[in-house]
Image (cartoon, helix red, strand yellow):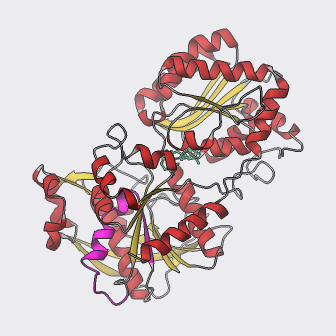
Amino acid sequence: MRLVYLTSEMAPFAKTGGLADVLGALPAQMQRMGHEVRVFMPAYASIDRKKYPLSPAPGLEELDLHLGSHRYRVGFATTRQPGTDLTVHLVHCPALFGRPGIYSSDPDEHRRFLCLSWAALEACRQLRFAPDVVHCNDWQTGLVPLGLKTIYARDPVLGRARSLLTIHNLQYQGGFPASILGETRLQGSAPLFHQDQLKEGRLSFLLHGVLYADGITTVSPTYSREIQTPEHGAGLDHLLRERSSRVVGVLNGVDYREWSPESDRLIPHRFSAEDLSGKEKCKEVLLGKLGLPYRQGVPVLGVVSRLVAQKGLDLLLDVAPDLLTRWGFQLVVLGSGEGRLEERFAQLQAAYRPQVCFYRGFNNELAHLIEAGADAFVMPSRYEPCGLNQLYSLRYGTVPIVHRTGGLADTVIPFDARTGQGTGVAFEHHDAQGLRWAIETALNLYKNKPAWRRCMLNGMAQDYSWEKQAKVYEELYRRAQQV
Ligand code: ADP
Ligand code: GLC
């Protein structure tokens, strides 16, 4: 098949979260499976050009893009994804992408990702690359399915293309004032927009993706069911229910080339299920780096996360003082995001140093070291479409402590000391008591060395490789072509 991927993030070029990891792995895997793949993402100013040199894109010429009264000169560059044979196309438009960071709250945010969307399709035309499937990701590419059904319906190159939309997070819908309709290039198809929404003065990209994509996936089976309920549907549950036969939950995979303790180039000591000694050494290095004392037998809990309400870390902040005092464990937190959460973690660190370290920022190397060196990993997410860190934790023998929701519910099996089965601890009710119970359960388990080791090894034996999951997408691409 000929496959086009459209994305706002891709590892290692531009990353804020798991979307980058997924796009960093799935397209390359599809290419390895013999498909012809093109990936398009913005040429953000923040992409490190020294590490990832950009070259001119052969066969692609600059184009003028008109979005309402706004005109943009758009070019293309290419680069090779390290460690793969995959060529990535970068949409070059300094007026839109030449600013710090990946996302913005600037008034032209919709135009930034419309530029990505339409420039990518125009590039396919220039290259005469006729995709069987255009795989869209999240709200940023949500208007592409409608574009394919209207602007490009009779196009010789794009006319046969079907669209698949993956929802990585339903809460981010790309909602804008309806007045931007004239800037979408789809104003000629205004009757095809959701009329009630327009009347309310709004226009959401993701909603229109849900309406018009030939296939819809989300990133775990449980989340695919949850988003069809009013509680988790973020206002789109009724539309998702209407299209229920097209909504499929496909669990994300793990790029074990990047995330395996046997081969991880970013950790100081490698280890495996057969020889765990390197893990203890990683723990020592981790604590040393963060200025915390290493004491054998003292458990270290780790967190690596965007600091946003979704991740439920306010619960951890609520229960941590009492638990830290009573249990004496250490806590290592890497993250950045909302000011209020950053501030609370900084206060926790100030009150509990050297038991607690909060590293504010984004640091991939430290993320790997925490996965390797921590004993347990805390993810009390309110909701979690898939979650990748619990999957990485499993592989690194770092016992996940999670709220039983979304992809966390699908991947962490509660450990049962009687049978020796299970891979972590999961709590049901999203409140302080639930998390307190889960952390105490894990800390008690940690005292029982053989049981803890069993739990670690069970986790390390799990296989969430992309090799498996990519086959599921392959099947869905085939199905999308049949509509
Ligand atoms: P989400 O996509 O909702 O943020 P995931 O668990 O799917 O959650 O993926 C998060 C990814 O982002 C993981 O690869 C994680 O290691 C990484 N990550 C999150 N915050 C940081 C940070 N502060 N520094 C380094 N990596 C981070
Ligand atoms: C989103 C979700 C996360 C998921 C990631 C990749 O950011 O919050 O749960 O793992 O996308 O699909």
> Is residue 297 something one can see in this rendering?
yes
Q: Which range is magenta?
A: 133-157
Q: Is residue 196 above or below residue 64?
A: above
Q: Residue 422: percent from the left, percent from the top?
A: 71, 35
Q: Is residue 141 located in the magenta-colored stretch of the structure?
A: yes
Q: Pick out the residue farthest to the left.
A: 199
Nearest the viewer among 75 and 86 is 86
Residue 434 position (above or below residue 309): above
Q: Is residue 277 left or right of residue 355?
A: right
Position of residue 103 measured from the top left corner of the image (x, y, whole percent): 39, 52
As drawn, 158 above or below 435: below
Residue placed most toward the observer, 199 or 289: 199
At x 28%, y 56%, the residue is: 207
Would you identify the image quadrant in which residue 359 lies? top right
Side of 254 where 237 appears, left or right: left
Does the stretch in magenta take in 13? no
Say if residue 68 shows up in the picture.
Answer: no
> Residue sitting at 78 percent across and 28 percent down?
452
Residue 189 found in image quarter: bottom left
Q: Is residue 313 left or right of residue 396?
A: left
Establish if 320 lies above or below 282. Answer: above
Number of marks in picture: 0
Decide which of 276, 35 is in the foreground and name it: 35
Quadrant containing the C terminus in the rendered view: bottom left
Residue 221, percent from left and from top: 51, 50
The residue under the point 81% across, 51% down is: 262
Horizontal side, residue 3 vs residue 271: left or right: left
Instruction: Pinpoint residue 26: horizontal percent, then vertical percent.
Output: 58, 64
